[in-house]
Amino acid sequence: MLAQSLLQRFFAIALILFVAGCAGVGGSHRSGLDVEDMNNAITLDDVSYIQAAVARGLNVNQSIQAPGYSNGAPLIALAARAASIRTLRYLIAAGADFNARTSVNETPLMLAAYFREDGESSVDRHDEAVRVLLDAGANLENPYNYTALAYAAYNDRQRAMRFLIESGAKLDADSVNRLVYVNTPLMMATIQGHREAVRTLLRAGADPLVRVHGGNTAREFAVKYRHTHIEPLLACAERLQPGLSFIERCDNPRVASRQ
């Protein structure tokens, strides 16, 4: 009987711990949170739903399961990904951590800088999300990981790139002695074949001679992926002598061809 009683107590405690764990990621019993409804509210920018959930006890720094994040993501990261501006502003004002990371080390700023939908209005919303996070003081960098500028460059988000560069984002990520462990924004734009994004970065002063440890420079990526519309720009930028401007010597295709 004693053994049976101990076994029952063991399973009871295990059940309590399991429920508590579910509440921490997938939902909040105290606030009566429905994860699917919360995801829909964030996507639709239904800030009143989020406000009501917070009034019932939801922590603004709660992480919930969401498409693409089976291990959970902070509410503010999901709002940034969806460019739900009212929700984003509310969460920031309510004290949410605007640098909170997802389970794969993405920040809200990275998600706002990367995601877009079809149609100019959506891009404008995501650009606004970038500005909201920058105005709040979001970190521009992400040491030894992809940065918000790299994410923007990869998806050709040129307006977001300009916002980030103007705010002081590092053009060459964590380059030390022209070596990095993670692709720089210039490499990311090159890999995807985004010529205008490459030009924007080179004009701003990105170093084309940075190399991934044991890997390629941006120009070598251009060759690898057969981006012949980009490789000459990078080749010209590589040959620039100190003090010479990319804009003056390489930005004009006819000039670049003579370098």
Image: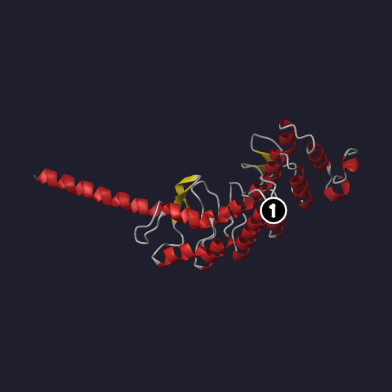
Compared to residue 59, the image places residue 152 above or below, namely: above
Question: Tag 1: residue type?
Answer: Glu
Extreme residue in the left direction = 1
What residue appears at the point 61 percent right and 54 percent down from the top-left corner?
112
Q: Quadrant of residue 133?
A: bottom right
Q: Report whether residue 178 is seen.
A: no
Residue 140 image offset from top left, x and y in percent: 62, 56
What residue appears at the point 72 percent right and 51 percent down from the top-left corner?
158
Residue identifier under label 1: 120
Residue 184 image offset from top left, x and y in percent: 67, 45
Compared to residue 219, the image places residue 126 above or below, namely: below
Q: How crowded is mark 1: few (under 14 residues within 10 Å), some or many (20 or more)?
A: few
In-image side of 69 versus 248 (left or right): left
In-image side of 242 versus 65 (left or right): right
What residue appears at the point 64 percent right and 34 percent down from the top-left corner?
214
Compared to residue 93, the image places residue 183 above or below, namely: above
Closer to us: 119 or 63? 119
Q: In which quarter of the image is residue 163?
A: bottom right
In-image side of 60 versus 81 (left or right): left
Closer to us: 11 or 127? 127
Q: Report whether residue 200 is seen.
A: yes
Q: Which image quarter holds the C terminus?
A: top right
Q: Quadrant of residue 253?
A: top right
Residue 60 image offset from top left, x and y in percent: 46, 62
In what element is the residue under mark 1?
Answer: helix
Q: How many labels does the image show?
A: 1
What residue appears at the point 31 percent right and 49 percent down from the top-left corner?
18
